[in-house]
Image (cartoon, rainbow, N blue to C red):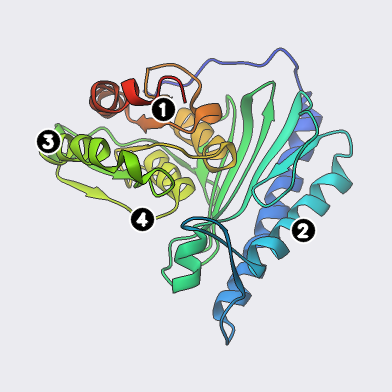
Amino acid sequence: MTERDSTAPAVSLSREEIEFIVKVGRMTVLEAGSLIRKRAEGSGPETVKNKAAFDFVTDVDRLCEELIVGRLQSAFPHHDVLSEEMDKTSAPTPVQWLVDPLDGTTNFIHGFPMIAVSMALVVEGVPVCGWVLDPLRRELFEAVRGEGSTLNGRPIGVRQPGSLAEALVGTGFPFRRKELLDPYLQVFQKVFREVSGVRRAGSAALDLAYTAAGRLDGFWEMGLKPWDVAAGTLLVEEAGGRVSDFWGGSTHVETGHIVAGSPPIHTFLLEAVRSGLAPLLRDQ
């Protein structure tokens, strides 16, 4: 028996609205995935630009963003759309789309095959529909609040390891905040000593989707963006897992400091980050 998050926004969507949202969302991420796949299989290097230190953007990021934003704005003209590469200055509306057109850009640049399209519909801050697509493996993770999570249409659920020693967890390094590397590594050591293994794949959206599917038992990372975690949050919750910030609260989409996993693994990871990292991030 799985546990699902009972959070519900005050603004409600009708069954017909949800069905249309799911139809458009699914078609849009699949179309973006096809674009990425064609570019990945093409010849010649991509044009790469630096957004910030250790943070890159390619032509594929921008092309996918233009495609996704165009489709969403056409289908839902009254919804706000916030995407990673956009210059967004207007105030968000109660119904908002959070989009990462290519999660794992550095992986894509290097031909490391761990990339994703991540998209979520958020109502008053609560993820209601979410999609994470691995375009290279053609795996579509999808969730609707209250209806469970699926992988290519088949139900998925978090794994319940028999012990910590059997658990496989994922993480991400604080590449934007390298001054926090030492305390992060202390948490890493604490976790690594107790579990069977730790993986760092480079796409938080896929890490969360893998947690929802039981391929990973848990995941933690700091300093992510809303579009990195909104869809994955819903996937894990609807798969019977737990998701929180580093203090056990629900600000992980806002702060980007996230802990996710099956209930016992979430508890273990939360204790590790609460003691080792949370005090350093309280006011950030």
**Mark 1 and mark 4: Cα distance apart in space:** 23 Å
The earlier-in-sequence mark between 3 and 4 is 3
**Mark 2 and mark 1: Cα distance apart in space:** 34 Å
Judging depth in this view, the residue of 17 and 50 nearest the camera is 50
The amino acid type, in three-letter code, at marker 1 is Gly
Residue depicted at x 14% and y 44%? 196
The amino acid type, in three-letter code, at marker 2 is Glu
Pointer 3: what residue?
Answer: 194
Front position among marks 1 and 3: 3
Pointer 2: what residue?
Answer: 66
**Mark 2 and mark 3: Cα distance apart in space:** 44 Å
Quarter containing the N terminus? top left
**Mark 3 and mark 4: Cα distance apart in space:** 20 Å
The earlier-in-sequence mark between 2 and 3 is 2
> Above or below — where is 81 with respect to 69?
above
The amino acid type, in three-letter code, at marker 4 is Ala
Instruction: Tell me the quarter of the picture where residue 145 sits.
Output: top right
The earlier-in-sequence mark between 1 and 3 is 3
